[in-house]
Amino acid sequence: MSDHVLKASIAAQTAAERALPVAVLALLGLFLLYGVGFAQPEALHNAAHDGRHAFAFPCH
């Protein structure tokens, strides 16, 4: 596949097609950060807590 064809196919993508993967990953990230972070089982909470500290995210 030539560069010209590849560039044309990328340019032909609509804004919605480019935004969908970003939105899905953002929702997954929010779930991991808040869904697991506020989970009741202690093991899940502790794992999320350690992850927040590893990325310098304030949690308490």
Image: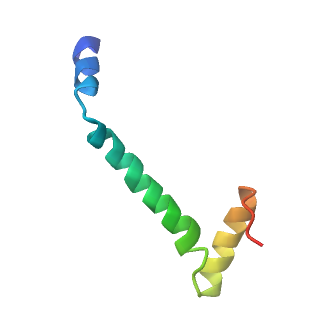
Q: Determine whether 46 is above or below 21 in the image.
A: below
Which residue sits at x=36%, y=47%? Answer: 21
Q: Determine whether 41 is above or below 9 in the image.
A: below
Residue 43 position, x and y percent, is: 63, 82
Which residue sits at x=46%, y=55%? Answer: 26
Residue 57 position, x and y percent, is: 72, 60
Which residue sits at x=57%, y=70%? Answer: 34
Q: How many marks?
A: 0
> Where is residue 27, by image quadrant?
bottom left
Q: Does 22 sit left or right of 58 as displayed?
A: left
> Where is residue 12, by image quadrant?
top left
Which residue sits at x=41%, y=47%? Answer: 22
Quadrant where the C terminus sits is: bottom right
Visual colour scheme: rainbow
Quadrant where the N terminus sits is: top left
**Quick one: 55 or 13, which is closer to the camera?**
13
Q: Residue furthest front?
A: 15
